[in-house]
Image (spheres, rainbow, N blue to C red):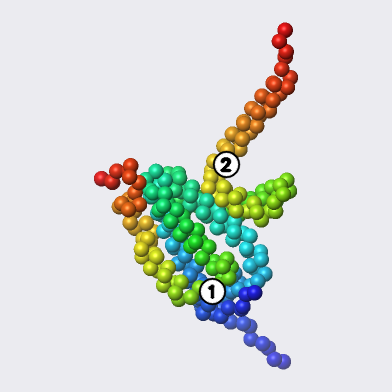
Amino acid sequence: MMMTPTNGQLLLAIVNCVLCLFVAYSCLMRAKVMRQWSTRWSWQLRYAALFGVSVVGAFAPLTMGEWPGWFHISIEGALLSIIGLGGSWEEDGVPPYAKKHNVKAKA
Amino acid sequence: MQLTPPPQPALDIVSAAIKASAFVFGSEAAAQYIGPYLVIIVASCVGAYLGTVKDDTKTSMATLVNAAVGTLAAVLVTVSISMVCAKYTPFEAQVWFVPIAGLIGFRYKQIPSDLGRLWGFGTRLLGDWLRLRFRETEK
């Protein structure tokens, strides 16, 4: 049973939705560069899971029945700063820790 | 005679957004109708992600458009396809939402050619069976 939310909860839900969609966009940009042939399976799986969780979490009140708080928003900001918003990192190619061993380093 | 003043239009964008999100997030009735489509959207988004990892789309715009078109196609056709599937299988329609939406998001571009290949495979099987069944005997 869903309680009627306060305005603050709704505002936090909007911010959470925007941030989660940014995380999903960043993961999609990762998928554009970190391909199946060049990236380790474990990192493909991690970014796919992060994408799915962020798409689910964008609509957290509907999908999980919980209202996002300040912790969710701050941790999403930290996540965005780690994975690189919108593929600003993509000139570097696949990171060395995620590269398959048979793929040469980018010249 | 007392005239009630007309309601002020809400020009504040934050309060407008809060009202809109109260409709989406807050109402139980909306959740009932949105829920299955939310499942379909999530499944087709993940399918589009995996398709992006697999294929070689060059630009970020192409990636976004692929994901958006796949998700839109999944939202449009998944419910009817899964109802048809539920009619001829022991599973309910909700069971078919995730695999069908995921497939559509994963390879919505290749689905026509996939159907063509399935048709070719089926007709080949049928032709083989007919040839075996009505084979002219030796002599």
- Bin the neighbour count of mark 1 within 10 Å (Cα to Cα): few under 14, some 14-19, many 20 and up: some
Residue B11: tell me if it is visible: no
Question: Do the numbered discs 1 and 2 sit on residues whose CB atoms are within 8 Å?
Answer: no
Does B85 sit above or below residue B126? Answer: below
**Chain label for disc 2:** B
**Image position of A88 with respect to A103: above or below:** below
Residue linked to disc 2: B111
For residue A35, side relative to residue B88 (left or right): left
Residue B63 visible within the image: yes
Give the Cα distance between marks 1 and 2: 38 Å
- Residue at the spot x=39%, y=64% of the render? A80
Q: Name the residue at 55% across, 58% down.
A: B42
Q: Position of residue A69 (x, y in %)?
A: 48, 75
Q: Which mark is residue A67?
A: 1
Q: Dot 2: few (<14), some (14–19), or many (≥20) neighbours within 10 Å? A: few
- Is the C terminus of chain B in the top left, top right, bottom left or bottom right quadrant? top right
Question: Circle 1 sits in a helix, a strand or a loop, which is it?
Answer: loop
